[in-house]
Image: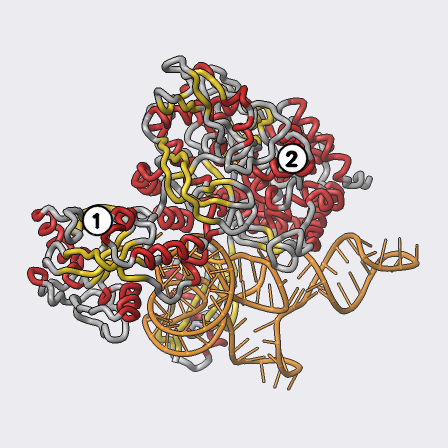
Amino acid sequence: MPVKPYVPAEIEPKWQKFWDDRQAFAASKDHTKPKFYGLIEFPYPSGHGLHVGHPRSNTAMDIISRMRRMQGFNVLFPIGWDAFGLPTENYAIKNNIHPAIVTKQNVDHFREQLKKIGFSFDYSREVDTTDPNYYKWTQWIFLKLFDHGMVFRDKTLVNYCPSCKVVLSNEDSQGGKCDICHGDVIQLPKDVWYLRITAYADKLLQGLETVDYPENIKQQQINWIGKSTGAFVKFPLEDTGESVEIYTTRPDTLFGVTFMVMAPEHPLIDKYAPQIKNMEAIQAYRDECAKKTEFERTQLTKEKTGLKIEGLSAVNPLTGKVVPIFISDYVMMGYGTGAIMAVPAHDQRDWEFAHKFGIDIIEVIKGGDIEKEAYTGDGEMINSDFLNGYTNKKDSIARVLEEIEKKGIGKAGVQYKMKDWAFNRQRYWGEPIPLIHCPKCGVVAVPYEELPLRLPEIDDFQPGTDGKSPLARIDSFVNCTCPKCGGAAQRETDTMPQWAGSSWYFLRYCDPHNDQAFASQEELKYWLPVDWYNGGMEHVTRHLLYSRFWHRFLYDIGEVPTPEPYAKRTAQGMILGSDGEKMSKSRGNVVNPDEIIAEIGADAFRMYEMFMGAFDQAIPWSTNGARGCRKFLDRVWRLQDMLAPADCPDVFSEDMRVSMHQTIKKVTEDFEKMKFNTAIAQMMTLVNEIYQKGSITPGEYKALLLLLSPVSPHICEEIWQDQGYGDPIYTQPWPKYDEKYLVRDEVEIAVQLNGKVKGKLMVPVTMTREEAQATLPDSDEVKRLIGDKQIVKCIYVPGRLLNLVVK
RNA sequence: GCGGGCGUGGCGGAAUGGCAGACGCGCCAGACUUAGGAUCUGGUGCCGAAAGGCGUAAGAGUUCAAGUCUCUUCGUCCGCACCA
């Protein structure tokens, strides 16, 4: 009797409800079992709904999580909502709906879409960063940071997006573009709250050595942190009694210094303005620089510009030589000390500047042609007094450091490219920063017992035109009493950046309903670290860095049991449009997962997302390719028509035994390595073989369904149930393979002459190298191939090939 | 400029230094069909009638054997970027 038709639209909702009703995937409270904590980046519930990129990451971790459950682990695979943020707020402003309502709608929509794809999330542990019971603990961690001196306020130049009316962190304004609206970011002097992430730079670097991340992710974080070692050296300013401090990675080139350069914003220029003779011109230059965006300043100034500061000069502390000081915007206030010693012979930027302004160039390292360009390689030191004769920079730097430290003119030091984290946003839809400004006591923390500091419900959430958050207009929120002195005080009205809530959400999942702590120590000890975290490359220098920072801080104050949050990180490649371009509305190449699921079903959709190519590569979408996966599932379904009678022994048939064991091994190992495409290909090969044979035993069918179930769970549950194979497939143990059944008795090997394949030969798999070399050259096939040539050498690779070197 | 990738059929892509192109898409043929945009079977890198030859961006090298290792060149993608 032919089997009933395969209709995904009927069986998929049925099994989704089945799992839901049973809370099939809720992590167990039983801590005696081995645990597995699998994590995906919780989505930002935007109004557009899921795109095809979300399911790629989710399906991958869903496969791993489902396999781990079948392997006997207590699995935590949670989901939540990173729901604070500007896009929601902007949408709310545009449509005049409260962001809380928008958020709820979007979350509901996302949850429904995720359930339609059949992910095995533990929905009982959902978190939402906008829930006061959640952000209470975000604020709590912030206060801990504050208590430990990790929060400070500073007035400096900040990245500011005029369109979003918001201050951005360095990480949020990469390339001089606003991360939210992609408009130009400008530099403004502003009072902002910083988190002292630079204090953790070394720990964040060292921690990378202890975790299993792909090399490119590690490298990107290392580059972003940008540690450099060098020296700080003080150059006295002539006739002032003060010095200007510089940072250099090559203190051993001090004898080649012929001028100095200060950043336009350098404060010493203001201090000595009265004695600077050309202050008017200097000021004009500074004004010009201030007008440029960060982008223009770093990209477009191929030609060096600048100006000599007349009336102010410096003294080389080692030689006593007087050197002129220039200002130029190729020196940044934000790195090092905002001033440099210029060594034009050995730094290309200094070289260009010296050429333009006719400054002396003194060679101190031999090896290049400083007439043509700066020489930055190694070589013998010359014109450098006690350094002369050194030939490698390690030694010469060590020697000069010794000297300058002895003379008290400088010291060894390190610098980081990474800057402290600008943490406040002048917008409504974020966590209120729990700080109070008291005219008497200064900045005072909101007492822990008053948390959560709730975001007031307001109707007018337009950003202020005065650079202040909408909260500044709510008198009842702003005005408060100082917790210290009881006097009238005012609340901080800025909110936290989107990255706050996501910096610790994986901790909350361990114990999401706890109202005494962000999570109990017992749960944290059991579940941490996250065993496997998959996400996108775009978060490597932001969320992934920020959350490692918060976690490491919490570890240092004894709140979490592990120094690193994530034991293993992987990253999926982007799904591109079928034209090979990034999916975007404007290109019209966006694929809507709902439509694909409606056509081929969630199981085939999931499978295609895993099958389309290597998991970590960017891959163009092909709907035809997806239909191919549906065809494969149809074939799996129709195997029911080929089933051997139920009374046949529940094992693998002899002629399929090797293929079955090989498939179990390959699928298991490939899932583990996230090589989903080849795991699926192996199952397709197996099914092709079964079709050629024309029949399948129940034992073979069961094994296939078990292997396939993490990828395409609904169809497997349905067949499993229809065939009466017992309890639901998600409760079944993962199949095992047996080493002794992985090879056949005889294998075909290639026969090569001088490395080129000329023929084939069947040999027993047990044949050793000695046996092969002794017997195979005498076989008829080999004799025919070599003719009258002489065998010079004979190489045998067991089970693979025989290579005869002949002449 | 610095750092990290990648380059294989018409397409997406497979290949612990050991038979290049698994698997899928597309295409061709056959079967079954009233029908086929369903299904099953077979074929499908290029040249050649065949024998055979040529093939993994280009060039060199190491090796019995190279898509894989080394060097050079070219192309391309991503991240950072006047970082002193």
Q: Residue at x 14, y 60 (%)?
A: A322
Q: Position of residue A454 (x, y in %)?
A: 53, 21
Q: Position of residue A88 (x, y in %)?
A: 61, 36
C-alpha separation, residue under disc 2 versus residue under disc 1 = 49 Å
Residue A581 visible in rendering: yes
Q: Nearer the viewer, residue A354 or A578?
A: A354
Q: In the picture, which quadrant includes the C terminus of chain A?
A: bottom left
What's under tag 2, amino acid-wise? Ala
Q: Which residue is mark 2?
A: A92
Q: Which badge, 2 or 1, comes first in the chain's sequence?
A: 2
Q: Position of residue A436 (x, y in %)?
A: 42, 23
In the rendered structure, the answer to whether residue A586 lies left or right of residue A315 reads right
Q: Tell if the residue under mark 2 belongs to the same chain as the one under mark 1.
A: yes
| Element marked by disc 2 | helix
Q: Which residue is mark 1?
A: A245
Q: Residue furthest top?
A: A486
The 10 Å Cα crowd at callout 2, few under 14, some 14 to 19, many 20 or more, is: many
Where residue A124 sits, quadrant-wise, is: top right
CB-based contact (under 8 Å), mark 2 and mark 1: no
Q: Is residue A479 above or below residue A403?
A: above
Q: Chain of mark 2?
A: A
Where residue A17 sits, quadrant-wise, is: top right
Q: Nearer the viewer, residue A356 or A27?
A: A356
Q: Nearer the viewer, residue A101 or A587?
A: A101
Residue A67 visible in rendering: no
Q: Is residue A365 above or below residue A55?
A: below
What's under tag 1, amino acid-wise? Glu
Q: Position of residue B30 (x, y in %)?
A: 80, 65
In the rendered structure, the answer to whether residue A473 lies left or right of residue A421 reads right
In the rendered structure, the answer to whether residue A171 lies left or right of residue A697 reads left
Q: Residue at x 26, y 52 (%)?
A: A339
Q: Chain of mark 1?
A: A
